[in-house]
Amino acid sequence: MSRRRKIFSLLKNKYILSLIVFSLWLLFFDQNNLVARFNEIRRIRQFEADKNYFKERIRTDSTRLNELKTDRENLEKFAREQYLMKRENEEIFIIEFDD
């Protein structure tokens, strides 16, 4: 019973009560509450990961484009593989494997 009295007496204290109400307001009801903050941090991390992925993709595509512009054999290989182009009197067989 003494434990309940201690808690009740703490809740009667206006400073402790104000602190509890203020903390609850900041944690759940404020525009910049804790839940929204964690969600924003998670979104920022995802955007940074996407940014790194696209930077790497741009770098590889730029080197590939440079190879295609400078080497005719690479251009022909790319056209055959990606767009299924062929020479005259040539047949193409496409084999797909199911994973």
Image (cartoon, helix red, strand yellow):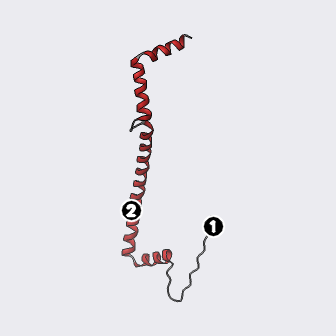
Amino acid bearing label 2: Ile
Residue 98 marker: 1
Name the kind of residue labelled 1 in the image: Asp
The image quadrant of residue 93 is: bottom right
Label 2 SS = helix
Q: 26 or 43: nearer the eye? A: 26
- Mark nearer the N terminus (2 vs 1): 2
Where is residue 59 shown, x and y percent of the image? 38, 62
Which label sits on residue 15? none
The residue positioned farthest toward the bottom in the image shown: 89
Farthest residue, direction right? 98
Which residue, given by chain and number where applicable, does mark 2 sit on?
58
Q: Position of residue 10 (x, y in %)?
A: 45, 16
Q: Residue at x 49, y 13 (%)?
A: 6
Q: Quadrant of residue 52?
A: bottom left
Q: In the rendered view, would you say 13 is above or below 32?
A: above
